[in-house]
Amino acid sequence: MKQSLQLNIGQRLTITPQLQQAIKLLQLSSMDVLSEIQEALETNPMLEVVEPSESTAEQTDEILSEIQDIGNGADADEVDAGNAEEDWEAWSYRYDGPTRESHNYNDNPDVFDIDRGNAITEGLQEHLIWQMRMTPFSNKDRRIAEAIIEGIDEDGYLSASLDEIASISIDIDEVDIDEVEAVLHQLQNFDPPGVAARSLKESLLIQLRHLDDDQTTSLALQIIENNLELLAKRDYKSLAQQLHVNDTDLHDPVALIKSLNPRPGNAVATTDSTHIVPDVIVTRRGDAWHIELNPSLFPGIQINQHYQMMIRRGDKSSTNRYLQENLQQARWFVRSLQTRHDTLLRVSQAIIGRQNDFLHQGAESMRPLRLYDIADEVGLHESTISRTVNHKYILTPQGLFELKYFFSGQIESDGEEAVSATAIRSRIRKLIEQENPTRPVSDNTIAGVLKEQGYHIARRTIAKYREQMGIPSSSQRRSFA
């Protein structure tokens, strides 16, 4: 198998403990990933930068034609998300970085003003609320979910008791503790893993249950469930006795537990930046839409062949063990980058495949889209899709947008095709932009216009969407005129 960016992967990616690093890289922004790459290059002698060359550029073109071409000469409205088979061991231990090509979007093609699109500043609660809106809750459960999210602190833990949440009642029918518990369990499946837990122990258990059920995970679950105090004391001898295993059998489960996040809320960092670098770029080439990762984000890295050749089988010296450990870490780091690359590309292709009308006509043509739709198409869990689209940006002919922007709930309409909340918000904004400043349109008037267009939207929903867009009421707009 030739060296390439091609990641052979099946319909469903099995998340094993060894892929914890891949999960971490997947949820990081591009700038944070770049920092991780720089740190890895500085601390691991087995990693080195791939120097660009003419042959590399030729190989890159070949790779691009394999995994990023979405149909030269094909209908631009069709996007091929690709299909490959799982073959982890056949990977090349080299990551060339995204394909490097020339993109003349402006004078500095690597940096884009945040004002060009819908990039937003978001914290943990906003991230949870967005996932809640993408989940088919009943009205009652949605209100309970909102109350739970309000009780989650910045570290990701639920600080309010279930009794307190149930007593809030929030203008709905009486709430039972069992109902709150059921909604809480659903929120505990949200991204980041371990969120909405009531204790460190519960958070760690939630994170472990997101993983593949193998012997390492099973032992880690037993340690957290029954022997957390022994682990905290580093009493590995007693721990091994309790689990009826050898001391060496504890290495992997203990390492797995150490890789978990004791403060899961911190995994969702607030984006507060004057410039945003796109992770994905959509361009039109002839009759086809072309989707690729930003070619300027990351350097290519590979295993240092000189140091790898120094490793000798059967050599138990400290130097040889040091090289072996760093080689294993380097291989998993390269695999993690490849996994992130492939997942982000496939998810972006699936999103644009569902929302390709947006590329032609803008937000008014946006279709309803939920996390489940993309998860089902690419064969990944909804929480993985949430991690993939969070703080990742795509540059389109319509501007720069966070990938989360393309997800929206469904609104009732008279037409055969469903309409998204994003499309309705766009229509509301357009009506307000076209109004007479001295006689601004009211929410009732907007509701009437939308009804004539076949969309039955309540006045209070119009007001909610208007407020979400930061648009004042008609009386306030009149006073500004």
Image (spheres, rainbow, N blue to C red):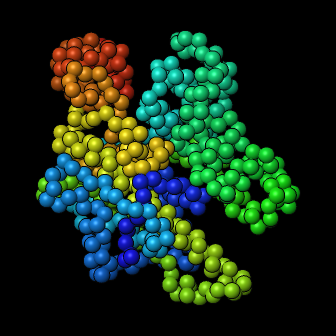
Q: Nearer the viewer, residue 174 or 12?
A: 12
Q: Is residue 140 above or below residue 159?
A: above
Q: Nearer the viewer, residue 94 or 113?
A: 94
Image quadrant where residue 20 sits:
bottom right
Residue plotted at (85% across, 58% down):
241
Image quadrant holding the C terminus, namely top left
Residue plotted at (47% across, 55% down):
13
In the picture provided, is 474 more to the left or to the right than 257?
left
Residue plotted at (63% across, 49% down):
208
Q: Position of residue 218 (x, y in %)?
A: 69, 52
How many tags in the picture? 0
Residue plotted at (55% across, 11% down):
173
In the picture provided, is 415 more to the left or to the right than 26?
left
Residue 437 is at least partly visible in this image: no
Q: Position of residue 362 (x, y in %)?
A: 21, 39
Q: Is residue 190 above or below residue 276?
A: above
Image quadrant holding the N terminus, namely bottom left
Q: Is residue 453 above or below residue 149?
A: above
Image quadrant where residue 354 sits:
top left
Image quadrant where residue 117 sits:
top left
Q: Position of residue 140 (x, y in %)?
A: 51, 18
In the picture provided, is 241 more to the left or to the right than 443?
right
Residue 17 is at least partly visible in this image: yes
Q: Position of residue 132 (x, y in %)?
A: 47, 31
